[in-house]
Image (cartoon, rainbow, N blue to C red):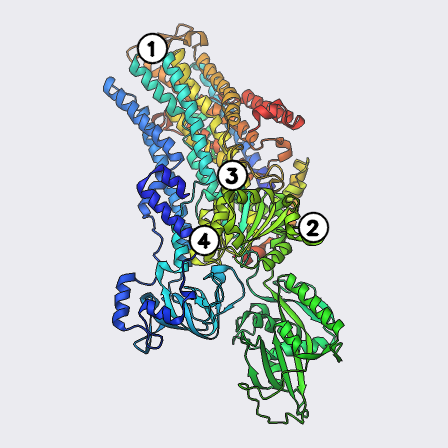
């Protein structure tokens, strides 16, 4: 992107491009590699005293407040102007300006200029302004909903300055400050941890890892995002306490850089905007071609230059479909409303269609595909793996709970567990309750509560005597309890932790409730189970217990947890439990539907490859039976390098590998693998992946909820954020918000998008058709000098009156075939409006309509005495005010006023004829391939439209006073029927065309006329 | 719904029957007097009545829509696809019946959505 900008406009933009490239690179934090002393020196701070107040104030002035610069908001009036002058409106504005120009010419040259052009210009301007206001308010409404998402609570931070602890606004934190955080706090800036006590942070919004990460003062990894000793701005501290030196504040933090990167990205035009542009080009082409042709003709026929110019303008303006802008806007609004009802909130009207064109969906894992809560998925006891229920509503299968081993395992899991339910949630279902504590402990808590009843009671019966909390050196957690039986004076020791560490301490194992010695065979089956569960991407914990012998540990024994005065060896192994963030219930189905709709689903996650792959397999992003290169290698027992990458449909790519890939290699991967998982990706890499897909011509949708997704959300053709769990930054960057966080809603979006694209085609075909019967009268008026058959006012009555409701009603049309079974449209080939549509509308149906109109025109004039033969060339006399004795074919003399009444009656009849032929047209436009008899007339809005347009025509013709107001006159009943044969003709003609299309798929008729 | 439509149509026919002879009569009478003058007054009235009836029909259609068509839109769109096959009028009738039969079902759903 930067390159392109650089080329187009050199100096200023290239600098901006460079900045963007800079931001796309990885995080430049180095403090994690420094020692604490070095760090202090760098920031002129003291590890005990903190900064001095003076220094802090100085830094605050130097660095600015510690907050993210809000993205530059577009002023309301610019948004309004964008609605007024964007896309389709330009066409109408050009028309209006041309009208005023023509009127100016007429006013300058003629004594009594006809007001038509002036009125037309005014009406065009009004139409644009009204439609502009409409879509402006539509979008303002959804942006208001956006505002309500904003969380305006000011954050506080606990800092140490001059040795004193003080609470200040997070905005006033500066680099070098010594900050203390505890469980539940939001981290106020990027911190280099200097000391920590059981501190865990939730980085899921930044990296996509569901599990809380522990923090400690040691540097564990070169990558600042992976190392343990850095805590990031706006992530949450889940438990424990930590103290750290602020290394970056505000926009310089990791989070800030992502936010800046996001707001700096420019999203391209939406597919529908491109289509409308293409349509405008086509229409302008036709209009200019017609205009120039008839300009030359007019000059040849001997009109003056000025007259010819006015004709030219008139013809060009007549080609502008006045009602189409409103029709398109209303159609899109209706779809947006329909989608909002199905929990897809669309921020930008044009984005309504984008999902329909989408060919690739890049989905984040955590919180989008998964539930973003750890849940117990498997258990291993009695030498057997048992599956737990991971569904959101506990509808899944259960396992055998009768085994005594299970009872033991459940007891250990319940006792050796510090998580508790928060108070006052007794009515809530267990899974919905909030817990205080570690995510995996909460998962255990919920699992036990679900299967064994109240954990609180178990804990009350077994009073805790001593406890050693989990730490990273021991890798286990231990507690000692009294037994349930009051007569039993032994103590129960329970322990959980990393399975291999637990196994090392065990000498026996419990099988079917009986203790058996741990033999090699048992150890091996343990290893197998551990490997299998680990291979599923699950986090495995081992459990063991011991009833302490009464003689060594009598009642009242003083357990000392600091120097462990009791045995922690020779325990009895109970079992394993493994946890995962399980996929949402509706996701596999939705992924399958996307697949069958020809959409490629790519998973892009910050999580580890094994977990990512397991979830990908679980939801069908890697479908059953498809292997990655590594799978093939391990199956055939050959090195990875010998496998032909083309054999593997699926692939899992690690973020670090992604860094080293060239653009070509990247393209190669995206092109040749249908099922791709990107793991351990940074926000910048997500962006690169989206750009890669777009480079290959795909229209990309990105779904995500975290801050780390927001650059990709912004860059994508359509960004879809999660409404409940999504972060504010991601919601701001997205074009669409799923209010129920349900990935399945995307399928609805695709369906609605595709439907509206098809239906817009129909609406446009319908609206454009009536252009021909509107232009031809003017053309014949110029060429053969007949009295004008159709005036400007009547044209406007059609375009802005009778045609509107039927055109809009086509948006309600049901799909002709299963639109979710076909491939996404090819943006280079399948256009909204193509030559074939223009040819059908203008060249075929439109021509028949014009014939119908002219037929009624000639009938009326003939009934009044003017046979067609006398009409040719009559115009000069006809329009001459001074000529009050014009003779018709029968020798009757007509005054100017009388002639005009007949002429306007003709206008009215022509208008009514167009309404009549448009009946057939709207029925014909309902389908593009199917017969109307197959489609049925289920669209009630369309029937309503037919009634209303006819009623409107009747009102316009018969209401008293119309002759003065709009110069429309009442028609005799018989004149209504003049155009009916043509209406029937249109219907039959198009049904035959569609029959031929269906009979000969791919034949000439389809190639030339299927739009 | 259908009965209302039927009623309205018969009303239309009735009005036309009442209005037409008078128009015809007027025409004939006038024609005898002057074949070049047309009774535009009764024509206007007929036309307006025609317009009003059509308009009312249309509105009725839309209003009746809100009672059951919208639901049909929402929950039967899938059904339409399934039953759509070559069945035409009959299929329509069928889906209507089905949608009516299913009526109580979508309501709690709608409430839940809100």
- Mark 4 Cα shell of 10 Å, populated few (<14), some (14-19), many (≥20): many
Residue position marked by numbered label 1 in the rendering: A876
- As helix, strand or loop, the secondary structure at mark 4 comes to helix
Tell me if label 1 and label 4 are in contact, CB under 8 Å: no
Vertical side of A453 occupied by A905: above or below: above
Q: For the point 62% across and 79% down, which residue is it?
A: A495
Q: Earlier in the sequence, mark 3 or mark 4?
A: 3
Pointer 3 and pointer 1 on the same chain: yes
Expressed as whole percent of the image width and height from the top left, the position of residue A69 reads 34, 56
Expressed as whole percent of the image width and height from the top left, the position of residue A768 reads 47, 28
Pointer 4 and pointer 2 on the same chain: yes
- As helix, strand or loop, the secondary structure at mark 2 comes to loop
Expressed as whole percent of the image width and height from the top left, the position of residue A820 reads 61, 42
Between marks 3 and 1 in the image, the one whose residue lies nearer the viewer: 3
Where, by quadrant of the figure, is residue A998 drawn? top right
Measured Cα–Cα span from mark 2 to mark 1: 81 Å
Residue position marked by numbered label 2 in the rendering: A625
């Amino acid at each position: 992107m930067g390159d392109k900008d650089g080329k187009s406009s050199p100096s200023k933009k290239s600098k901006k491009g460079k900045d963007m490239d800079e931001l796309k690179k990885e995080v430049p934090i180095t403090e994690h590699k420094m020692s604490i002393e070095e760090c202090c020196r760098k920031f002129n701070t003291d590890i005990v005293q903190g900064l001095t107040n003076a220094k802090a104030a100085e830094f605050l002035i130097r660095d600015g407040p510690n907050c993210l610069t809000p993205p530059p908001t577009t002023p309301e009036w610019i948004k309004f102007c964008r609605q007024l002058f964007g896309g389709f409106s330009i066409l109408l504005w050009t028309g209006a300006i041309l009208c005023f120009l023509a009127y100016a010419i007429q006013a300058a040259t003629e004594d009594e200029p006809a007001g038509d052009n002036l009125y037309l210009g005014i009406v065009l301007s009004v139409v644009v302004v009204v439609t502009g206001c409409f879509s402006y308010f539509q979008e303002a409404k959804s942006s208001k909903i956006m505002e309500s998402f904003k969380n305006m609570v000011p954050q506080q931070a606990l800092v140490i300055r001059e040795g004193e602890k003080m609470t200040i606004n997070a905005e006033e934190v500066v680099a070098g400050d010594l900050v203390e955080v505890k469980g539940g706090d939001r981290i106020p800036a990027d911190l280099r941890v200097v000391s920590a006590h059981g501190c865990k942070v939730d980085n899921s919004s930044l990296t996509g890892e569901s599990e809380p990460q522990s923090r400690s003062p040691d540097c564990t990894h070169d990558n600042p995002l992976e190392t343990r000793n850095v805590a990031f701005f706006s992530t949450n501290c889940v438990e424990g306490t930590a103290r750290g030196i602020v290394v970056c504040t505000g926009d310089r933090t990791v989070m800030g850089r992502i936010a800046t990167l996001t707001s700096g990205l420019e999203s391209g035009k939406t597919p529908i905007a491109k289509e409308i542009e293409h349509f405008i080009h086509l229409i302008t082409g036709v209009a200019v071609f017609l205009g120039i042709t008839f300009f030359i003709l007019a000059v040849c026929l001997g009109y003056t230059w000025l007259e010819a110019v006015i004709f030219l303008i008139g013809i060009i303006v007549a080609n502008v479909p006045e009602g189409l802008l409103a029709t398109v806007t209303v159609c899109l609004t209706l779809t947006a409303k329909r989608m909002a009802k199905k929990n897809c909130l669309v921020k930008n009207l044009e984005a309504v269609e984008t999902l329909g064109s989408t060919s690739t969906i890049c989905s984040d894992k955590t919180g989008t595909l998964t539930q973003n809560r750890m849940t117990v998925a498997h258990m291993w006891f009695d030498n057997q793996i048992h599956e737990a229920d991971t569904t959101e509503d506990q509808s899944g299968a259960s396992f055998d709970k009768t085994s005594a081993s299970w009872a033991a395992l459940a007891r250990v899991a319940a006792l050796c567990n510090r998580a508790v339910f928060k108070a006052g949630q007794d009515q809530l279902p267990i899974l919905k309750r909030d817990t205080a504590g570690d995510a995996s402990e909460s998962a255990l808590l919920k699992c036990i509560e679900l299967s064994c009843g109240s954990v609180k009671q178990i804990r009350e019966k077994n009073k805790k005597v001593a406890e050693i909390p989990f730490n990273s050196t021991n890798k286990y957690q231990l507690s000692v309890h009294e037994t349930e039986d009051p007569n039993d004076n032994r103590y129960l020791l329970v322990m959980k932790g990393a399975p291999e560490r637990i196994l090392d301490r065990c000498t026996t194992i419990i099988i079917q409730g009986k203790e058996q010695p741990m033999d090699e065979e048992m150890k091996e089956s343990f290893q197998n189970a551990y490997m299998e569960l680990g291979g599923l991407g699950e986090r495995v914990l081992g459990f063991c217990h011991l009833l302490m012998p009464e003689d060594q540990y009598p009642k009242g024994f003083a357990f000392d947890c600091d120097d462990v005065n009791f045995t922690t060896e020779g325990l009895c192994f109970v079992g394993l439990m493994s946890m995962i963030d399980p996929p949402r219930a509706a996701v596999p189905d939705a992924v399958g539907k996307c697949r069958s709709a020809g959409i490629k689903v790519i998973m892009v996650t910050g999580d580890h490859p094994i977990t990512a792959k397991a979830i990908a397999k679980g939801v069908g992003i890697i479908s059953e039976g498809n292997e990655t290169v590594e799978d093939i290698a391990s199956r055939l027992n050959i090195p990875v390098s010998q496998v032909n990458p083309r054999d593997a449909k699926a692939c899992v790519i690690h973020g670090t590998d992604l860094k080293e890939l060239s653009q070509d290699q990247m393209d190669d991967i995206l092109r040749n693998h249908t099922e791709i998982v990107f793991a351990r990706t940074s926000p910048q890499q997500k962006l690169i992946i989206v750009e890669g897909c777009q480079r290959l011509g795909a229209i990309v949708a990105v779904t995500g909820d975290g801050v780390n997704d927001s650059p990709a959300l912004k860059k994508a053709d359509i960004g879809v954020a999660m409404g409940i769990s999504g972060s504010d930054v991601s919601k701001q960057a997205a074009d669409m918000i799923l209010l129920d966080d349900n990935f399945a809603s995307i399928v609805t979006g695709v369906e609605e998008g595709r439907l509206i694209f098809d239906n817009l085609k129909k609406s446009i075909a319908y609206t454009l058709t009536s252009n021909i019967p509107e232009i031809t009268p003017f053309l014949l008026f110029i060429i053969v000098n007949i009295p004008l058959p159709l005036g400007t006012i009547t044209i406007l009555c059609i375009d802005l009156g009778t045609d509107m409701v039927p055109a809009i009603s086509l948006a309600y049309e049901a799909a002709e075939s299963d639109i979710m079974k076909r491939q996404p449209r090819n943006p280079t080939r399948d256009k909204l409006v193509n030559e074939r549509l223009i040819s059908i509308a203008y060249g075929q149906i439109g021509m028949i309509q014009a014939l119908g109109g002219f037929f009624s025109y000639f009938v009326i004039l003939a009934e009044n005495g003017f046979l067609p033969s006398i009409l040719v060339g009559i115009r000069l006399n006809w329009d001459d005010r001074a000529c009050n004795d014009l003779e018709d074919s029968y020798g009757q003399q007509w005054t100017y006023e009388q002639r005009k009444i007949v002429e306007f009656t003709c206008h009215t009849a022509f208008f009514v004829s167009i309404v009549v032929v448009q009946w057939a047209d709207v029925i014909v436009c309902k389908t593009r391939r199917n017969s109307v008899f197959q489609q049925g007339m289920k669209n009630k809005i369309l029937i309503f439209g037919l009634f209303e347009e006819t009623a409107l025509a009747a009102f316009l013709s018969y209401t008293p006073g119309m002759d003065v107001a709009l110069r429309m006159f009442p028609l005799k009943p018989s004149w209504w029927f003049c155009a009916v044969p043509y209406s029937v003709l249109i219907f039959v003609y198009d049904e035959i065309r569609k029959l031929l299309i269906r009979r000969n798929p791919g034949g000439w008729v389809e190639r030339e006329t299927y739009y | 719904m259908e009965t209302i439509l039927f009623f309205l149509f018969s009303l239309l026919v009735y009005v036309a029957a009442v209005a037409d002879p008078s128009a015809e009569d007027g025409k004939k009478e006038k024609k005898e007097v002057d074949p070049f003058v047309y009774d535009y007054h009764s024509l206007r009235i007929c036309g307006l009545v025609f317009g009003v009836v059509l308009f009312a029909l249309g509105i009725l259609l839309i209003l009746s829509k809100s009672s059951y068509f919208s639901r049909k839109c929402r929950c039967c769109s899938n059904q339409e696809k399934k039953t759509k096959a070559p069945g035409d009028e009959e299929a329509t009738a069928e889906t209507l019946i089905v949608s009516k039969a299913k009526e109580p079902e979508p309501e709690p759903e709608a409430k839940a959505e809100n």
